[in-house]
């Protein structure tokens, strides 16, 4: 049996969660498309399994494991908006490629009923997938900034009452050692009184 490090176990567990949720969303979405377009929600659900699994696998692998590469670390240091735009564009291309390839239709039905651009629902499918991906990326990036538990508490409304906190911080610059000790202590007292009031 292969022993995995704790971080790898956590990432694999996250990948499994992404795969399951992506597949479930694919089933729901394609069932609705199958019902509205073909009056066959069961067929749409089967296609949704393949599309959802394929999209969530590719995006999950990129999101969970590619950020550990050199380029991934460089992207993580970029501004928030840039991260969301770059990841959204990249994942949007993955979604469009899966939709254009019509993998689900080819595997389930053995043929493509009609080319994607002749299907009246193709725009809605791509727009839904891309918007959902942007929302997913936005929430993921916010949770990385503020922390998962803090984001959960904010979403669930657990921050109704403000709490009095006494923050402590260290003011250190290259000039700090040269300052007179009394001036430095006075500055800290002023900053602390401003923070408390």
Image (cartoon, grey):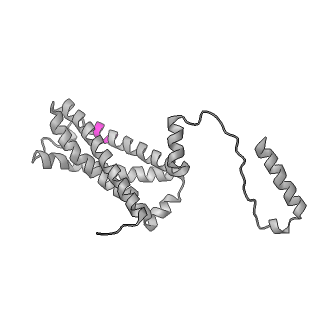
Residue at the location (54% across, 34% down)?
157
Please tell me whether residue 53 is drawn above or below residue 184 in the rendered image: above
Please state the horizontal and vertical placement of residue 88, each as a whole percent of the image: 41, 49
In this rendering, the answer to whether 104 lies above or below 158 is below
Q: Position of residue 28 (x, y in %)?
A: 26, 37
Residue 103's place in the image compared with 65, above or below, is: above
Q: Write the start and end of the magenta stretch as one range.
A: 123-127
Residue 124, magenta (yes or no): yes
Whether residue 99 is visible to the viewer of this picture, yes or no, is: no
Residue reaching furthest front?
1
Can residue 20 be seen here? yes
Q: Viewer-proximal residue, 57 or 167? A: 167
**Point 86% across, 65% down: residue:** 179
Q: Left of 78 or right of it: where is 104?
A: left
Q: Is residue 179 left or right of residue 73?
A: right
Q: In this view of the protein, which residue sits in the foreground, 45 or 111?
A: 45
Residue 113 found in image quarter = top left
Q: Is residue 86 magenta?
A: no
């Amino acid at each position: 049996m292969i022993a995995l490090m704790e971080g790898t176990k956590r990432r694999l567990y996250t990948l499994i969660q992404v795969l399951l949720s992506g597949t479930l969303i694919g089933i729901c979405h394609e069932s609705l498309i199958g019902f509205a377009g073909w009056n066959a929600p069961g067929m749409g659900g089967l296609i949704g399994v393949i599309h959802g699994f394929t999209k969530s696998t590719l995006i999950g692998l990129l999101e969970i494991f590619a950020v550990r590469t050199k380029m991934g670390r460089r992207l993580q240091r970029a501004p928030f908006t840039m991260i969301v735009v770059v990841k959204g564009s990249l994942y949007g291309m993955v979604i469009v490629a899966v939709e254009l390839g019509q993998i689900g239709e080819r595997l389930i039905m053995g043929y493509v009923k009609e080319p994607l651009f002749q299907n009246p629902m193709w725009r809605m499918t791509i727009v839904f997938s891309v918007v959902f991906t942007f929302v997913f990326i936005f929430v993921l990036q916010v949770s990385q900034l503020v922390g998962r538990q803090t984001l959960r508490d904010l979403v669930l409304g657990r921050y109704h009452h403000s709490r009095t906190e006494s923050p402590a911080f260290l003011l250190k610059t290259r000039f700090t050692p040269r300052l007179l000790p009394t001036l430095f202590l006075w500055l800290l007292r002023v900053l602390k009184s401003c923070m408390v009031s």
